[in-house]
Image (spheres, rainbow, N blue to C red):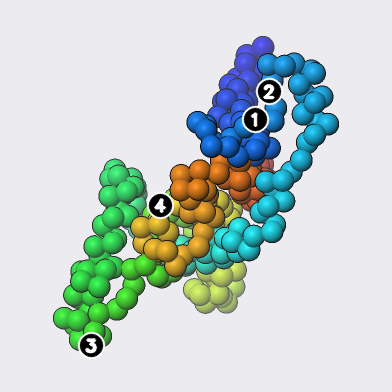
Amino acid sequence: MRRAALILVPYLWLLALFLVPFAIVFKIALSDPAIAIPPYTPTLDLREGWSGLRDFLSRLDLENFTFLTTDDLYWKAYLSSLRIALIATLCTLLVGYPIAYGMANAPDHWRPTLMMLVILPFWTSFLIRVYSWMGILSTEGYLNQVLLWAGVVSEPLTILNTPTAVYIGIVYTYMPFMILPIYSTLERVDGSLLEAAEDLGCSRLTAFWLVTVPLSINGIVAGCFLVFIPTIGEFVIPSLLGGSETLMIGKVLWEEFFNNRDWPVASAVAVVLLLILIIPIILFQRNQQKSREADG
């Protein structure tokens, strides 16, 4: 009974905060738009019981989902979000892995300080951190001032309101999610394995690729998923740093809800996005399960 009660708690949490909201959004996605508050007409009324459910199934249509396939905006937004998320995840990995590697090889008395520096940005509001990048990347921002002062450029660079600014914002924001799992795996790497590889004739670089990287693969996979999954649906960063030129599904979703007031279509967009995210979520859970089995 204790084990069942312990397992029941996360399942109830999942039911309350995931399955129930998903069911509500899916119900709205099957509704018809209307000029009202809320701006839709439900096609399913649970108060009518089984008769209402039978009536709903008899006239069920997926018009809002079909509409997504007729407008290029939506599938382009999905593809653009996937592309941006993949590139941003790769950039975060390229920057985050050396930091995690340096932390894992730092003296023991320095590691808590380095860990605190990685976590320190979370002590500040997410919006404030993104707004600060607007001041850094703007034409009159600090970055251009430093580049002009150093003579690197002759005129200010246009970085804000471009995809480059979006990548910078995503890499900066989600960097801790990449560093921490990689650092966790690198910290447990047995140094004697590297010494054995070097004794067998490997150089330090070869030993790094043949020993350290394979042993840290679980942290790499976990970090990539932790960055990739939330980046696909990101809204704040592309809105503030990318401007109108950056197309991501999170921005489209917000515009459908609050500008167009088309809740059924917006809910259909959200349902499809969630179905896309289920694939990396399942892969992430399997990777975590394999990692736990390997540690056990």
Amino acid at circle 4: Val
Q: Which residue is mark 4?
A: 236
- Could you say whether the residue bearing mark 3 is in a helix, strand or loop? loop
Q: Is residue 117 above or below residue 98?
A: above
Identify the disc placed on residue 57: none
Q: Which residue is mark 1?
A: 42
Query: 171 or 41: nearer the eye?
Result: 41
- Who's the residue at 45% across and 52% down the image? 235
Query: Looking at the image, is mark 3 or mark 2 nearer the viewer?
Result: 2
- Could you say whether the residue bearing mark 4 is in a helix, strand or loop? helix
Q: Is residue 264 above or below residue 170?
A: above
| Proximity of marks 3 and 2: CB atoms separated by less than 8 Å | no
Amino acid at circle 1: Pro
Q: Position of residue 219 (x, y in %)?
A: 54, 53
Q: What is the CA distance from the residue labelled 1 to the residue labelled 3? A: 59 Å
The answer to whether 51 appears left or right of 203 in the picture is right
| Proximity of marks 1 and 2: CB atoms separated by less than 8 Å | yes
Query: Looking at the image, is mark 2 or mark 4 nearer the viewer?
Result: 2
Which comes sooner in the sequence, label 3 or label 2? 2
Q: Which residue is mark 3?
A: 154
The answer to whether 74 appears left or right of 116 in the picture is right
Judged from this view, the residue extending furthest toward the top is 1
Q: Give the quadrant of the C terminus.
A: top right
Q: Which residue is mark 2?
A: 45
